[in-house]
Amino acid sequence: MSTTRALDGIDETLAPQGRRERNLIYEWLSTVDHKKIGILYIVYSLIFLLIAGFEAMLMRIQLAVPDNHFVSPQTFNELFTMHGTTMVFFVGMPILFGFGNYLVPLMIGARDMAFPRLNAFSFWISAFAGLLLYFSYFGGSGLYAAGSAPSVGWFAYAPLTAKVFSPGHSTDYWTLAIFLSGIGSIGAAVNFVTTIVCMRCKGMRFGRMPLLVWLYLVTACLVFVAVSPLTAAQIMLTLDRYLGAHFFDTQAGGSAVLWMHFFWIFGHPEVYILVLPAFGFASEIIPVFSRKAIFGYPAMVGATVAIGFISLGVWAHHMFTVGLGPSANTFFVFATMVISVPTGIKIFNWLATIWGGKLIFKTPMLFSIAFLFQFLIGGLTGIMLSVAPFDWQLGNSYFVVAHFHYILVGAILSMIFAAFYYWYPKMTGRMLSETIGKWHFWLFIIGFHLTFDFMHIPGLLGMPRRIYTYEANRGWGTLNMIVSIGAAIQAISILIFAYNLVHSYFKGKAAGHDPWDAWTLEWSTPSPPPDYNFAVEPAVNSRRPLWDLKHPDDPDSDYE
Amino acid sequence: MTEHGGTEPGTHSASHDGVLMPVPTPWPMAFALGVALIIAGMVTSWVISLLGLVVALRAAVGWFREVLPQENHAAVPVRAETITISTTRGGPAQLAALARHRKLLPIETFSVTAGIKGGLAGGTAMIVPAAIFGWVRYHSIWYAVNLLAAGGFVSWAGQSNAFLAQFHLLGLLAAAGIHTVASLLIGMLYGAMLPMFPRKPILTAGFIAPFIWTSVLYSALGVISPILNARIDWLWFVISQIAFGLVCGFVVNLQVKVRTPQFQALPFAVRAGLQGGAPNPGNENKKQ
């Protein structure tokens, strides 16, 4: 083992020793430290992940066998609404904001986010939004004693959301919670953009930023553009429901299609808001575990920006069945197909990074490889659905549900798990158990493929999404049973993961500051990093500053 | 410990006592709670909204006092001890033994404008065989133009050959747009690919690439443009593709190559032309 001394330290600090006497609760409630806020986002998202996972399990029990009445139809509607809303707004976005909060300042050599107090506010408003949504289970009856939790689906199409069809306050809980969450998302996006643009350390030009930082920059820009229409739509819907406005009231000159446009102008970029950070994780993890620099950095950046732009022009592929007309259909078919070009560039570059590398199959790499396969398959079924006539046949079927879960779970959640295994040592100073991690990985992969591979088939056979139950003679029973068994296996794997998080925090192996022999700045700090991140503000000369420090005779800066 | 440093938002400076960092404050959390309660009152009771308003106002005042007139910063003490940044792998010793362990990408390539020029020239050249085909087969140079444009006009799917042989301004504009875009894209592809196959440019650009492109289109044209697929003459199509490839490849190869960032990795003597040639990328060992 070589221990080449390369620098008198980008950082010259040790992790704080011993435990200070302090009020832990107050410390976490009042923190403005980006690392603690990042951890708050992550823990809060994990709690909601367990809740939404529990809702998914209830749905799968309901659908496992024909003619089942395990839950009532109303409860089933509430379950799929709360599951979808929770996973998108209170798991997916916050957990990615959490990792971004933690990692972006460290990766660009900054000591905090640009607006630390706004950062805290953004987290707390998002957290209270989640609590408000779930308070609907207790307070949703409202004035009319009707309804409980929201039951209008996660995209809440009009006119179902009109007061006459959704009496009581259940839909209002959904609208107002999303509105609050949107405030938090926009606040976080402001912080990311300002931090990345203004607070990079000396030498870190845009062309030297880690790809994860690039991806968070584009994600934050997408949040600006995408969340604003959603927030506007929520205000309009609230005006409809509270003050008798008619934006979406089809019987008074309003337009249900207007809501669809507003929602999907948010909804499709939202997919990229969720997947771009996952791309960032892959772009950091795959090179380290392939022991090669990322292949085609400029192309990866270009593809990221291209995806950001193109994703803003594809929303109506969710609306092919509305009847948009040939011109609009043609435009959105081609726009949707075009987005496969930059995503294809990314996949090829990840493969080229792996190609010829000295691969290390630790748990983060296993999840990253699974991500590559699953994202590819999810992308291919996405191209199938981008063809309007194909979508007319399978729109709102379980084929669509399988497709987007391939992206959300197979790609995004897989990379979130990879990110946990990769950066948990930095956050806690402890390694996650590899043995438990491999159990987690293999059970998750088996469960995932049992669930979502087989879910395509009932969709092809005509099983509509959101169906409460089905008759035995449809021929969907065996397939749905397999899907439900797969979901149960996934649930077990996630419980194992949760156990690993807790167990390793107390009994995990000490991580040291750089357990993966990695190359980005966060690995030059102690684990966990001190409040100020870097005692001496770093300066970088290449995209892999730690490579340069570890190999002063062969620095990247000579080649970039 | 707390002091009011006159720092800009988002800046943190080191002092003799430590690093100045923002002081923790509960007011952002309280403000978020207040706003959430105001909103929650809309689905519960106006009393909740009123409570939220009070909390939000108090929190706003507290927050303002944190940042005005100056941000409230505290010096966090630094515990300094050197951390050695080192690799756990045996890389450096091996690397030193390998003079050329880095995989070098081409040190020269064509610029994007070379591809654009080639695409425009090739696109112009392939008009000639296409026009000859229309004239010979349908006695009209407009047939090929309208056939290309028909992919964008659903209503033209059932039109007769006589209709397609007539001049249509809309068809000319649509075909010009499709042809220009496709020519530019293919031209840039040539610009990117030709440096990878430097030995036989005429064979590569003039024949292999057109045949590959034709093969791809042969299988995909039914989806892209069914009307074009139904009426296309593949022999003439291949001829026009070869015309494109030869002219495009010729024009691209005429352009001056630009140096890539990899050129900077070469020793000064090589860059200055004083010593040896550039290493052959194909023989380089891969980077660790």
Image (cartoon, grey):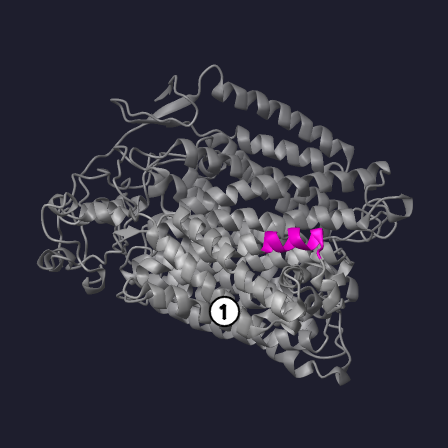
- Measured from the top left, where is residue B281 in percent x and y? 22, 60
**Bounds of the magenta span?**
B167-178
Q: Which amino acid does label 1 sit on?
A: Ile
Task: Check if residue A34 falls in the magenta segment.
Answer: no
Nearer to us in this view, B37 or A114? A114
Image point (64%, 31%), residue name = B34
In percent of width and height, residue A34 lies at 43, 38
In the orientation shown, which residue stands out farthest toward the right? A251
Q: In this view, does B214 lie above or below A169?
A: below
The quarter of the rendered structure image containing the N terminus of chain A is bottom left
Disc 1: which residue: B239
- Please determine whether, in this image, residue A470 is positioned above or below residue B276: below
Name the foreground residue: B22 vs A399: A399
Residue drawn at (38%, 26%), measured in percent from left and top? Answer: B11
Q: Does residue B169 show up magenta in the picture?
A: yes
Residue positioned 42% across, 57% down in the render: B248
